[in-house]
Image: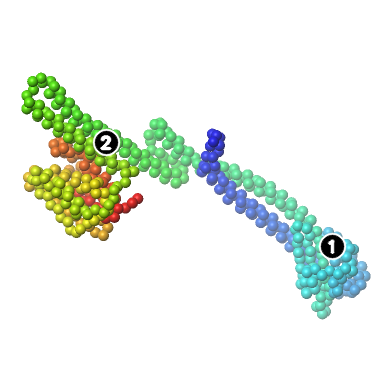
Amino acid sequence: MSLKLKKNKWKFKSIKFRVFLLILIFGITPMMVMRIGILRNFERREVESKTTQIATQAKLLAAQIASSNYLTKQNSEVINAEVVQLSGLYDGRIMIIDENYAIVKDTYDMDEGKIITSNEVVTSFQGKSTSRYDRKLGYLEMTLPITNPTTQKVMGVFVVNMSSNTIMTNYEYYRGQANIFTLILGILIVVGAIAFSELLVVPLKKLRYTLNQRRNGLADEAVNTKGCQEVEDIAEEINGLITSMKVLDESRQEFVSNVSHELKTPITSMKVLADSLLAQEDAPAELYREFMEDIAAEVERESKIISDLLSLVKMDKSAAKPDIALVNINELLEVIMKRIEPIAKTANVELVLESFRPVSAEVDEVKLSLAFSNLIENAVKYNKEEGGWVRVTLNADHQYFYLTVEDSGIGIPEDSINHVFERFYRVDKSHSREIGGTGLGLAITRNSILLHKGAIKVHSELNVGTTFSVRIPLNYINN
């Protein structure tokens, strides 16, 4: 497809063209309908006016005919003159028919003495007047009964056929005037449609220009386009989207910086230890062993960071579908508690599980197990040095199951509670590094719970303890 055709295609798809077309349709269509209606109404009124005029004069003439002996002998010069005069006045033809349906008078001198039995004549013999307008053939016909004034008996029929040239001449004149008016009004509608459609897209053009300026780095201010309410609403939504993207970009940059730092720190430590060993030619075996143990610990720490990062990336992938199955949550927690029990005993922390009822739910067992393990293991690791406890409770209703992990640990400062689910965020960096924390555990936990369309909340008091509350639907909800 050529560039020109592509441009034309976009023009036809544009809002400006569609608005122009709508105004054109809804402006010209009613005008044309009104024009046709007015002209037809004018023609009808002209026909009615002519019919009334002819009927008035024909009735007077019919009354004269009825009161004379004209139907038998057409010897009345006065009536003959009036009939001819009326025929000439309306440029038409008049016929007078007697009771035997014979034409006794024809101003065209064509059919005198002939019999006529048309529907209109028969109707008039029944005492009714008729009128018929034939626009195509260009004539107006009327029939009136000639009634005996004494007996009220129909003696004959008065027929008038007139040309509609006068009506059509007036009609053509007014149609010409209507065409001129329609043309002028049509031009005004087209000009108005073009102007209005241009005016309508001005705010959109401004919006597009501002966005291009922002994209090219030529402007940093918020998108602010004055115009119709809809465009202002779009600008407001775009500003919100830009703000969200800024926050996301800053978060991404911070995440990359944190990842770089966290991955670089163990490597730096290992390099320092290795360089120290290499600098000592006759270093004792004990020193070698001590340094190698430290290097092994740093390698383990590096491995844990990478594993947590991989878990987090898998959680973030929108295309990765969870492996949903019906899982017994009571048994899942018992397995997790059994796995963490040795860590709790080493830390001298009492580990308690309370299940109020059997719970089965549609979940991804691997991802949910990782989330619950992080919560319980953190509760153990960040507990009191002596005499600490961790209480895990499980409950459910008809729609959700609820997990609570409560501990008697060191707690979380109030200014840190809103950040504990952020990646690489650690409340006590020295303590976290001491016990091998990477700052990714709670981020992984939150992502896993959100993946199950659940929710997690935290309540903590410094040096008293922390409680994590989790709510997850029993039935997995597909988007």
- Few, some or many C-alpha atoms within 10 Å of disc 1 (few <14, some 14-19, many ≥20)? many
Mark number displayed over residue 255? 2
Residue in the image at 82% along x and 67% along y: 159
Residue in the image at 17% along x and 47% along y: 376
Residue in the image at 78% along x and 62% along y: 140
Q: Secondary structure at mark 1?
A: strand
* 281 on left or right of 415: left
| Quarter residue 377 falls in | top left
Quote the CA–CA distance across marks 1 and 2: 104 Å
| Residue type, mark 1 in image | Arg
Q: Is residue 66 visible?
A: no
Count the labels in the image: 2
- Residue 166 horizontal/vertical position (percent): 78, 56
**Residue assigned mark 1:** 93
Which residue occupies the foreground of this view, 461 or 422? 422
* 2 on left or right of 388: right
Mark number displayed over residue 133? none
In this rendering, the label closer to the viewer, 1 or 2: 2
- Few, some or many C-alpha atoms within 10 Å of disc 2 (few <14, some 14-19, many ≥20)? some
* 323 on left or right of 100: left
Circle nearer the N terminus (1, 2): 1
Which residue occupies the foreground of this view, 248 or 386? 386
Q: Quadrant of the N terminus?
A: top right
Q: Does residue 258 lie above or below 358 as drawn?
A: above
